[in-house]
Amino acid sequence: MVSNTEWFDVAQIRPYLYVIRERLDKIDPRFYTTYTNLYLLLGDHTAMLIDTGSGVANLAELVTALIDGRDLVVINTHNHFDHVGSNYQFPETQIHRWDFRKLMFPMPVDFLQGSNSPYLSHYRERQWKMTFAADCVPLLGNEVFDLGNKEVELLYTPGHTPGSISLFSDTQEVFTGDTLHYGAVFLPSDDRLPYYQQSVADLTGRIEETSARIFPGHENFDVGLELIDAFSKEFPEALQHRGMYDEFLEATVYQSQHFVFVRPTGKVAKYSTSVIQ
C-alpha cells in the first residue's frame, strides 16, 4: 500500500472542511483527469467523508486522525472506482439505492491493466477486483444528515450514473461529485442524457438560489458560478461536434476550453459498461 504522505494532498479550506486530493492520472492518465477530490466535513459530534477515492492508500487512517473522536458517516456520490475504492477500509458506507447494487459484489477494474502505472499493485494483488465495506446502506435521495450544528441535505442528481447525488451543506457548500466539474465530463448514453441535463439544471437553480460554493469530485474546487457559466456555453457546443474517437474509452471525446466531454459510443461502449453503469 502506498504511504499516505506520498499519495494524499490534504488541505484545510474551512475551519470545518478538509479537501483530500488524489492524482487519478498517476493511476491511469487515459481518463483525461488529474485530480480526484474527497471532502471531510466536520460537525460538532459527527464528521462526513464524501467519497473514498481509489483505495491505494490508507484513507481510513488519515480520516481517523482528522476527525478527533467524532462519529463518521461515509457517503459515496456515485459508484465509480475512483470514488468508492477505499470503501473496504470503513465498516459502513452509504450510496444512493440506484448505485447500491454495484457495490454488493467485487467490482472488476481490469480496464486499468494497460496503464503501466507503478501504483497498480493494490489492484493486481486483488486480481483486478475491488471489494467494499462490510455494510453498505442504500439512500433514497432526500435524506438530511445532522452532524451537530451543521446539516447536509442530499439532492438526487442522476445522469452521470443512475444513482449520482450531490450534497448541500447549510454552510453554503455544494459537493457535486461528477455531475458538475471542470475537466473530463463523462456523459451517459444518449437515452440517459435528458436526466443528466435536468440534474445540471436542478443544481444550477439551487446554487444560484443559495450562492453556494461548488466543491466537485475532480479538478478545481471552491469555485462559483463561473463553472456553471462555462458549462452552459460549452456543453451545447460539444453536443454539436463529432469529436475524436478514443479507442481505450470506446467513446467520442470533444475538448473545449474548460472541459473534455466524453460520450459513450453506443450502449455497449467499454467505459460505460465497465465503469459508468
Image (cartoon, helix red, strand yellow):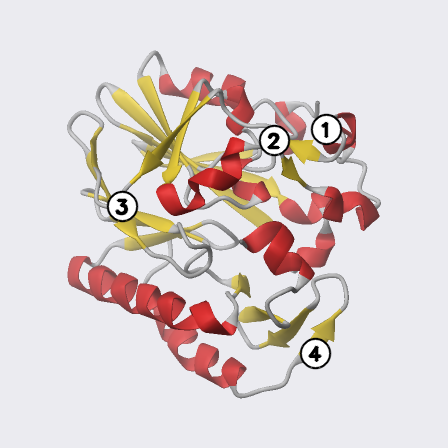
Which of pointers 1 and 2 lies earlier in the amino acid sequence?
A: 2
Q: Position of residue 127 (x, y in %)?
A: 76, 30
State the residue at coordinates (27%, 46%): 141
Question: Which of the pair 146/12 is nearer the observer?
Answer: 146
Which residue position holds label 3? 141
What is the CA distance from the residue labelled 4 to the residue labelled 2?
Answer: 31 Å
Residue on which disc 1 sits: 122
Mark 3 is surrounded, within 10 Å at the Cα level, by few (under 14), some (14 to 19) or many (20 or more) other residues, namely some
- Kind of residue sitting beneath label 2: Gly
Give the residue displayed 70% in from the left and 78% down from the top.
Answer: 244
Mark 1 vs mark 3: in front: 3
Q: Is residue 33 visible?
A: no
Identify the residue position indicated by label 4 in the image. 244
Do labels 1 and 2 touch, CB within 8 Å? yes
Question: Residue drawn at (24%, 60%), measured in percent from left and top?
Answer: 207
Q: Residues within 10 Å of mark 4 (few under 14, many from 20)?
A: few
Q: Quadrant of residue 232?
A: bottom left
Q: Earlier in the sequence, mark 1 or mark 3?
A: 1
Q: Nearer the viewer, mark 2 or mark 3?
A: 3
Disc 1 marks a residue whose amino acid type is His
Relative height, residue 43 to residue 157 (above, below): above
Residue placed most toward the observer, 13 or 145? 145
Task: Calculate the distance from the C-alpha at mark 1 to the C-alpha at mark 4.
Answer: 32 Å
On the image, the x and y values in percent for residue 24 come to: 64, 46
